[in-house]
Image (cartoon, rainbow, N blue to C red):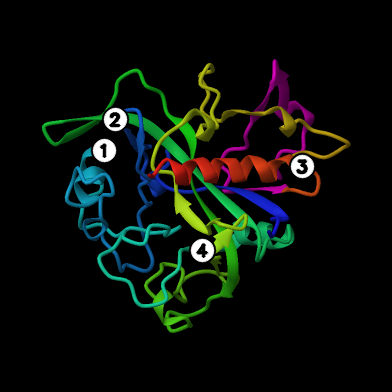
Amino acid sequence: MTIPKHIIFSRKGFDSTARYGAKPSPIFGGKRLLTLPIPEDKKKTIQYSGLRDPTEQFPSLGPIVEQLTNGKLDGNCFAHLDPDLRPNSVSTRLPGWRPLFGQVDQSQTHLCNQGVGAGDLFLFYGLYRDVAVVKDKIRYVPGRPPKHVIWGWLAVGDVLKVSSEADDPEWARYHPHFTDQRGPNNTVYVAADRVFGTLPGAGVFDNYSLDLCLTDETQKKTSLWKLPSWCAPRDGHYPLTYHSREECWGIRNHCVLLQTKSPGQEFVLHTKNYPEAVQWAKGLITRGVAARY
């Protein structure tokens, strides 16, 4: 079994700024997670109306983004489907398709500087809030605050440097990072077939659970996380990059509190310093896969 050298907490999906949708992704009925991809402004290939609603409550993601953004986005707008983790998100796939994730600019430079590559594991998290659906109308539940939730994963199999829409592999050319409109370090991470021996190399957590929630729900700040006790700084090491100041961290009972940097996209954990993270991540994915059946 390959042990990831790095586990990356990667912030993806709808978020609070206008560029990223300006709203949280929905949690239906307190349980079902649905990550909404952010709007696309460069490679306009996939519209929200062309993306399947995995909850099967709406014909596509179009009505969902239109209602949650009060019409600022609709089904005709283009989506930045990244990371692309669900095989059936779109109606057709070319043979050989594998889940993909792209990164570029400063965030990719950070991943490169940390040595992230094949064998490593991305844990994707995003901003979520509870919603209710009544007579085909979707609304945020009053009084339910937003929170950061882990919603998917991708174990890195291959790393592709992309400069053109015509780059190989052909089955990946639909992806928004297969374009010459991004920076010179434009990179696409391709999922491995498996992670931790037998688990799927990429996927989504369909159902919300407390162990996927990063936000300390007893507090009022979404960016204040409650983490396992093994996350405490030790021997001069801090678990997550961009958080190397003592005042970011605190201990409460059997938990570690972290005031996360905002904005932030890629927080890297080195498992050499925090080996407990490996079994923790494996447990999340194991339970997430089991919950589907």
Mark closest to the chain's N terminus, 1 or 3 = 1
Start and end of the magenta stretch? 240-269
Label 4 belongs to which residue? Answer: 102
Dot label at residue 131: 2
With 151 as the anchor, is 273 left or right in this view? right
Q: Which residue type carries mark 4?
A: Gly
Looking at the rendered structure, the secondary structure element under dot 2 is strand
Q: Is residue 101 above or below residue 169?
A: above
Of residue 9 and residue 201, the one placed in the foreground of this image is 201
Label 1 belongs to which residue? Answer: 68
Instruction: Please tell me in which quadrant of the rendered image residue 35 appears.
Output: top left
Looking at the rendered structure, the secondary structure element under dot 3 is loop
Query: Label 4 vs label 2: CA separation?
Result: 29 Å
Q: Tell me the mark number nearer the camera, choosing from 1 and 3.
A: 3
Mark closest to the chain's N terminus, 1 or 2 = 1
Label 3 belongs to which residue? Answer: 274
